[in-house]
Image (tube, helix red, strand yellow):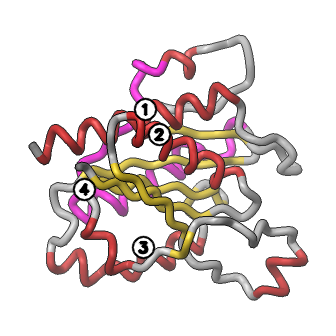
Amino acid sequence: MTKVLVLYYSSYGHTEQMAQAIAEGARSAGADVDIRRVPETAPREVAQNAGFKLDQSASVAVVDELPDYDAIIVGTGTRYGRISSQMAAFLDQTGGLWMRGALNGKVGAAFTSTATQHGGQETTLFSIITNLMHLGLTIVGLPYSFQGQMTLEEITGGSPYGATTIAGGDGSRMPSENELDGARHQGRLVAETAAKLSS
């Protein structure tokens, strides 16, 4: 059975919801899926004062477990058009895996959350994808087989480079059903691609 890791960082729960939808999609393709989050690096008092969602159910990831998976789907909210420092700190610890080629040939994908429609969705996805390509992963995006990203009927995330959501400037908007469907679609595609490559 194909093993998929959904690895994410979420300050306020938006990316966490997208991670759960990605996992649903991968499971619908028959994959064995684990959801893990990267460690919080902000001091606890700072995180609490900022209203971070600290009670997330996913267990904390360990770098050494990454080679156990056939596919790794990485998500984080944007920070000024790039990945969060928490995700960067975690990925910066993968040098040993890179040196050994431990992730070469695996499947990778990216998803993100931004405050606004043009607040770095695609640049953040590319920030993630750049890391994954250096680690030797083959990238799966969110192609236009997911027609939901073509809609003009509502404000929505979605990019050919990965599933996205828009949180709103005050963080009050949670992922829409269309955005969650995009995440499920991408999760399924990643699982299907990993299964084909490993057969």
Please state the extent of the stretch shown in magenta in the rendering.
117-146
Q: In the rendering, at what x and y percent does residue 40 appear?
A: 64, 78
- Image mark for residue 70: 4
64 versus 148 height, above or below: below
114 left or right, relative to 22: right
State the residue in front, 155 or 40.
Answer: 40
Which residue corresponds to the image point at 74% horizontal and 18% vertical from the top-left?
Answer: 154
Q: Secondary structure at mark 3?
A: helix
Which residue corresponds to the image point at 58% horizontal and 74% vertical from the top-left?
Answer: 86
Q: Can I make out residue 169 in this image?
A: yes
Mark before the other along the chain sequence, 4 or 3: 4
Q: In the rendering, at what x and y percent does residue 124 appear?
A: 54, 52
Q: Crowdedness of circle 4 by 10 Å Cα count: few (<14), some, many (20+)?
A: many
Q: Crowdedness of circle 2 by 10 Å Cα count: few (<14), some, many (20+)?
A: many
Mark before the other along the chain sequence, 4 or 1: 4
- Image mark for residue 6: none
Amino acid residing under circle 3: Leu
Q: In the rendering, at what x and y percent does residue 49 appear?
A: 90, 77
Query: What residue would you read off at disc 1?
Result: 142
Query: What residue would you read off at disc 2?
Result: 162
